[in-house]
Amino acid sequence: MDFCRKQVKSDCEELLSRFQTTESVRFQQFSDIWREMKFEHIFYGTMKHEKRTFSRLVLDTAYRYFLPPFSFQIRVGGLYLLYSLFHCQTASPSEQIRLSLKDWEDVKKFEKDAVNAQHFDVTFILRQMMFHKAFHFTAMPTLLAFKKKRKIEGSPLCEEFMERTSRPQELINTELLEELSNVHDLYEKMKVSVASSSEQAPSSVNLIRKDLVPQLRGTVVDFYKWQQKKDETDDDEDSGEGTSSQQECSRRAELVASIKSKAYGNAAEASKSRRHRQVEVDFTSSEAGPALTSSHSRTSKPSLKARTNESVFITGDLWKEAMTSTQINCLTTLDSVPEEKPKQYKRFKW
């Protein structure tokens, strides 16, 4: 598989280099390049007993581009490449991607940066891989076996994919500053000698910047300090492209809360047994709004006696009889009913 390793590495770098030229981190751009190169055919032609080994080799090769020190765009491309290769492999069951514990912190930081920058397609692809259990969490990045070589010859990293955050410090070093100082002194002496030989000193002699080397060194040092300070503030405050939208959302939430407080005032919530009564509002507050009445307020109705007195009008002696108490014998006997005579039955003769 050593020959296949070099070929797979070159194919992956070709795909990622094309993705780098797009200057985008969208999955649509990557999928177009994937289909154009017909990269899913990489698994075709392997023998049945070599499918799992070759899938392991391809995933390990693509996994390297998902980790530092590569740039953010290349790491996104590595994530897309892992996602596509995992779903296109011919091994059954699917071979998982080995994710060591020391690399888990880098993956979480990568996800956090993608969320802060609002690259939601990157977050979606990563969480889909977690959902489909594409990662196999291990203690070591490589599989350990008996009588295996301790050190494997590593291939050199592609310099085009590296993130150059300290490029000015690498260019402006001590040797370059010393050489630049010597050249500047020699140039100044030549200018002075030419000016002294002529009758009129040319104005170009006054254009020599005498503090060129110290100023260049100070600029590089200031840039390095600013870069370190920016990295620290980014880690502490989690700053990113999504900061402006988060501040806008917080301002909108505060505005809605203030509107609600002005609309409802300082109304105190009543207990469950008294919620049918009217809610009392503190009118002394300057922000108190209109008084609120409970929807379940109970209206007081007159009693049955009061309603009877209002509807029935009795005058004269009947009113006096209605106010007096009724005797029991008046309820049992009636004067107007005549007394009934006992019935007489005829006797039959025997």
Image: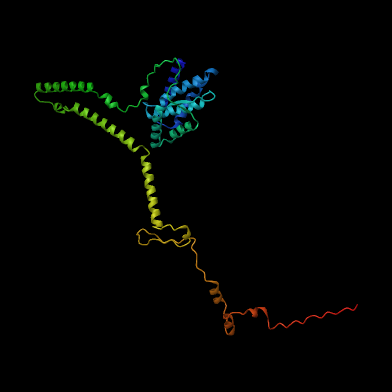
Return the residue found at the far front.
350
Residue 258 visible: yes
- Residue 322 lies left or right of residue 150; in this view the side is right
Q: Position of residue 266 (x, y in %)?
A: 39, 57
Q: Position of residue 41 (x, y in %)?
A: 51, 22
Return the residue found at the far right.
350
Return the residue found at the far left.
199
Q: Nearer the viewer, residue 347 or 52?
A: 347
- Residue 151 lies left or right of residue 314; in this view the side is left
Q: Nearer the viewer, residue 169 or 238?
A: 238
- Residue 70 lies left or right of residue 205; in this view the side is right
Residue 35 visible: no
Q: How many marks?
A: 0
Q: Nearer the viewer, residue 8 or 304?
A: 304
Question: By what rule are the colours in the image chosen?
Answer: rainbow
Which residue shows up at 39% across the image and 54% down it?
261
Which residue shows up at 39% across the image and 53% down it?
259
The answer to which quarter of the image holds residue 201 is top left
Picture layout, residue 129 above or below residue 60: below
The answer to which quarter of the image holds residue 249 is top left
Which residue shows up at 27% across the image and 24% down it?
171
The answer to which quarter of the image holds residue 30 is top left
Q: Position of residue 50 (x, y in %)?
A: 52, 18
- Residue 235 lies left or right of residue 79; in this view the side is left
Q: Nearer the viewer, residue 305 or 115?
A: 305
Q: In the rendered view of the protein, which quadrant contains the C terminus?
A: bottom right
Picture layout, residue 88 above or below residue 248: above
